[in-house]
Amino acid sequence: MMISKGVLKRLACCYCGLRSQPSFIHHFRNFSLWSMKKDPDLEAALSRNRRWIVNNQIKNIILRCPNQVVPLEHLQKKFKTLDLQGKALNWLKKYPCFFEIYLENDEYHCRLTKRMIHLVEEEELVKDMQEPVFVQKLAKLLMMSVNQRLNVTKLNELKHSFGFPDDYIIRILPKHPEMFRLVNNGWRKSSMEIELLAWKPDLAVSAVEASAQKQGIEPCFSCSLPSTWIKSWQRFEEFNAIPYISPFLNPRGLEEGSKEMEKRIVGLVHELLSLTLWKKLSIVKLSHFKREFALPEKLNVLLLKHPGIFYVSNKYQIYTVLLREAYNGSELVDKNPLVIVKNKFGDLMQEGLHEYNQRRRVVNLEKKRKCMNLMKPERRKVASSETSNQDDNGDTLGGLGRLFDPEERKRFYKVLFDER
């Protein structure tokens, strides 16, 4: 019995489908671990403007250059590291309030505008004023770590989230030798660590404990879920009934996988988010501190178990955890002075982009108008040529074309019958 090729193909597809089914289920299960009902307000708050991030990086490149001027050719080479394509000139022209482009010695150069320089100076003033806050944040981070030490390379990944300046090590450590020191046992740059030398009991108070002291109640978490989430509220109340464990407590006495250990981890992540500018952190970067903060292997699973405290999102394919209670709708409840300055950068960028789009719109409308004006004479020429062709065709028929006119036909037949 002969079997057709079509039947064989269908059998092969079914076989491959059966073989690949466990793999599909495995991937589906992995994906489900990240599932969380989306909150439109918090998703809007997590809208990380990639344009702003790229322009901020370009700003830092310009500030590092001599006289704060960068040749466009040099900036074009940096575009690959910024994950950008196309010409740097076209990108910079979109933000006239950010960047000023000029031609010198037949070469384009770029520098910051005066308005941008004023904002940079304002940001530096705020950083100087916030230096005591940086000291407290760094001390708290070290106090929450298991050995009161943190790797510098890992900490640099989160320095902007905590608001630390790029030169925080040079800016902070030399001024506070009684509190911090640099340790490098491996004699490699990647093995450099910051160590806490003096424990500060007044700093060993978490945001949850500070809020409870103000209200005169026992430390506990707050839930920011709608009342319709009945099951989530029940789970939250059961979890909140367990006594609060400070993130500054050494976890060595806690059993791994116990409810007390889970309470301590939730409190630690809550405190870490409270120390950030936008009350959010990348889960992947946070997972790099598993050893330092005694975090679980599957941190994402633990965070998803507490939707009343944390909000997990994969916007822009970057898994981020956000502190729910820190937001009212899509707006931060308490804005750090650095956040206010950075928002001004964003407003200036949007103003320049709007100006650029308006100019492009005017130019496009002008081009369209010119094209329409050019097309009108052409249309007239075509119309006149068509009428002349019709006349020419009538003449070549030797006058027979007139017979198709009804009036001409009447006169023709009248003359014909009258003659008879």
Image: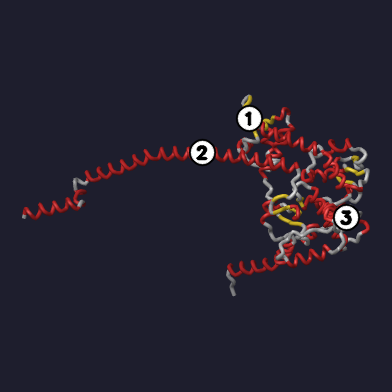
Element carrying mark 3: loop
The label nearer to you, 1 versus 2, is 2
Dot placed on the residue nearer the N-terminal end, 2 or 3: 3
Residue type marked 3? Ser
Pointer 2: what residue?
Answer: 362
Give the residue furthest to the left: 420
**In-front residue for pair 59/298:** 59
Residue 411 x, y percent position in the rendering: 13, 51
Identify the disc placed on residue 246. 3
Pointer 1: what residue?
Answer: 108
Give the residue furthest to the bottom: 1
Residue 96 x, y percent position in the rendering: 62, 35
230 lies above or below 340: below
Dot placed on the residue nearer the N-terminal end, 1 or 2: 1
Q: Quadrant of the N terminus?
A: bottom right
Dot placed on the residue nearer the N-terminal end, 1 or 3: 1
The label nearer to you, 2 versus 3, is 3
Q: Quadrant of the C terminus?
A: bottom left
